[in-house]
Amino acid sequence: MGAVTVITSGKGGVGKSTVSAGLAAAFSARGRRVLLIDCDAGLGCLDHILGVAEQRVFDLADIVSGRAEPADAVYACGTLPNVFLLPAPGSQEDVVSPAIMKQLTEAFSKYYDHILIDCPAGVGNGFASAVAGAQRALVVSTPDPVCLRNSNRTRQLLEQLGVPQQRMVINRFSSRNFRLQGFYPDLDTVIDAAGIRLIAVIPEDPLLAAAAARSEPAPANCPGALAFGRLAARLEGEQVPLAPLQKF
Ligand SMILES: Nc1ncnc2c1ncn2[C@@H]1O[C@H](COP(=O)(O)OP(=O)(O)OP(=O)(O)O)[C@@H](O)[C@H]1O
Ligand SMILES: [Mg+2]
């Protein structure tokens, strides 16, 4: 049975989809078989990021309604070996119920090493549905007080919904901006503000944004991709240190 991880956040636009795609690429590089499930009904973007938008015919809602068999709505990502995408429903009305998401993830987990669920922004029905089948959550946050306050709220909601295993991913980190903004003296204070254990720091890396816009994988040796490699290793239980942050 594969590990089911939901990628969530307390605030929209902080990098959930970027982390989902980057982590899938990193697991692929480790030889793993990965299914990404895009739960951002109406606003899904992983089909574009992974370059499967053109092939896409069916999505998550089609499986649930019986219009498609599960295998028909799963698309192989041509640029990343062993990475597959189940695209998000095209309409926000088609949010899948938590009970069905649980069944689906359980059924799919037999065929993959990792299932990564990209959560929509906010903490409404889409959130409850996305987290329903997950064993653990990555809470993505930028290192600023507003986002971290919301991460703390997300932590509590995840606990209420039965996902106590949580780790924090600080995204878009730049030591220069961190110093200039002066919100926090150091990263330890950031982690205290969110109350979730840190598992990765992903740098601000324009190559990640450029690759996503072009539907291409990020260059394997760019700082962002290297950080995703370390995150993938840590999620598989390896003792890998965080990168020296002064480099970011
Ligand atoms: N580490 C990074 N370095 C540079 N740009 C980034 C980084 N992470 C995310 N971005 C950019 O930030 C924007 C928002 O990222 P993304 O779409 O992944 O966020 P999201 O949390 O999934 O948003 P939503 O809540 O709308 O689903 C995108 O343009 C993306 O390319
Ligand atoms: Mg997103």
Image (cartoon, rainbow, N blue to C red):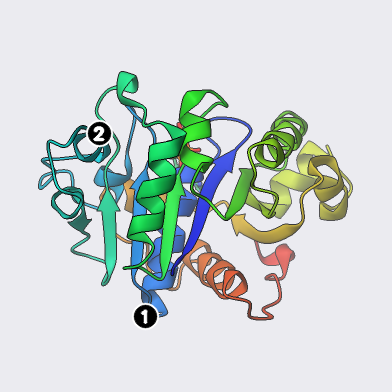
Which residue is tagged 1?
Answer: 31
Q: Tell me which amino acid carries mark 2.
A: Ala
The image quarter in which residue 150 lies: top right
Residue sitting at x 25%, y 44%: 48
Give the x, y percent position of residue 104: 35, 48
Q: Secondary structure at mark 2?
A: helix
Could you tell me if residue 18 is visible in this image? yes
Please, is residue 210 above or below residue 201 in the view?
above
Please, is residue 53 above or below residue 10 in the view?
below
Out of 179 and 158, give the one closest to the viewer: 158
Query: Which quadrant does the N terminus fall into?
Result: bottom left
Q: Secondary structure at mark 1?
A: loop
Q: Quick check: 30 left or right of 53?
A: right
Out of 30 and 181, give the one closest to the viewer: 30
The image quarter in which residue 157 lies: top right
Could you tell me if residue 206 is visible in this image? no
Q: First in sequence, mark 1 or 2: give its number.
A: 1
Please, is residue 246 above or below residue 106 in the view?
below
Give the x, y percent position of residue 222: 46, 67
Which residue ends up furthest to the top in the rendered image?
93
Query: Which quadrant does the C terminus fall into?
Result: bottom right
Out of 30 and 130, give the one closest to the viewer: 130
Q: Tell me which amino acid carries mark 1.
A: Gly
Residue sitting at x 74%, y 36%: 156
Tag in front: 1 or 2: 2
**Distance in Å between CA atoms under marks 1 and 2:** 29 Å
Residue sitting at x 58%, y 67%: 231
Which residue is tagged 2?
Answer: 61
The image quarter in which residue 79 lies: bottom left
Please, is residue 185 above or below residue 123 in the view?
below
Q: Quick check: 156 left or right of 142?
A: right
Give the x, y percent position of residue 244: 72, 70
